Image (cartoon, helix red, strand yellow):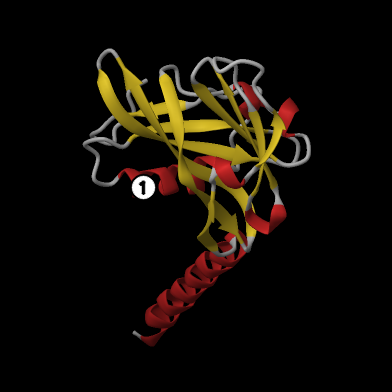
Amino acid sequence: MTQPRAGFLGAFLWAASMLLAQAAAAGTIESAYTPLDLDKCETVAAPEAPEDGAVFRCKGLHGMDVRVAEGDLRMFVSYGPNAEQQSAASQTIPVFNTIGKTLEWRLDDGAPFATILRYRWDSDNGEGSTLVVTKIGATDACHVAYVQAAGNAKANALAREIADGQARGFSCGRDKPRTYGADGKQTD
């Protein structure tokens, strides 16, 4: 009887060591927060007329540039030294919107790989807010998911789960952002 038990224990220990190795390879995932107050950001391009949009450069985590552009009453947010050329520089939610004043960064061993930002919106159908999950890659940044926050008590947790599970493997040129409703279920 001691042979099977030893075999089981050995297999269990091997499986446990493999899981620990995988967890160690994934690094430590955590959040960091930075303010996103446009009044405290540098104005890169001022509007020529009140209806024209402006472009701002804000300081993000570890001094990373956060580019915020406004156009047609919609906000566009991208990251890093080439922020203007990123996919995220032309992505927003489809209705008139503004952005929240806190930017959540998802970090893997201290290195940012995604952000979560609340967009507040107003349309003919009412008003609300959407959490936008954005991938931060070595050469591009782009939207990964849109999580409806109104009526969704677990919207922040869902946005973190999506960022952690999808952002790093998301292809900005190939993949399309997914939308999640107030019930947390994917709607598209």
Q: Nearer the viewer, residue 52 or 140?
A: 52
Residue 57 location, x and y as percent? 68, 39
Q: Is residue 16 visible?
A: yes
Q: Residue at x 48, y 76 (%)?
A: 13
Above or below, 153 against 134 in this view is below
Q: Nearer the viewer, residue 140 or 69?
A: 69
Q: Residue at x 41, y 43 (%)?
A: 159
Left/right of residue 72 with respect to residue 156 in the rendered view: right
Q: Amino acid at mark 1?
A: Asn
Left/right of residue 174 with respect to residue 182 in the rendered view: right
Residue 61 location, x and y as percent? 63, 55
Left/right of residue 68 with respect to residue 120 in the rendered view: right
Q: Residue at x 56, y 18 (%)?
A: 50
Residue 146 location, x and y as percent? 42, 31
Q: Is residue 172 visible?
A: no
Mark 1 sits on what residue? Answer: 156
Q: Residue at x 42, y 19 (%)?
A: 96
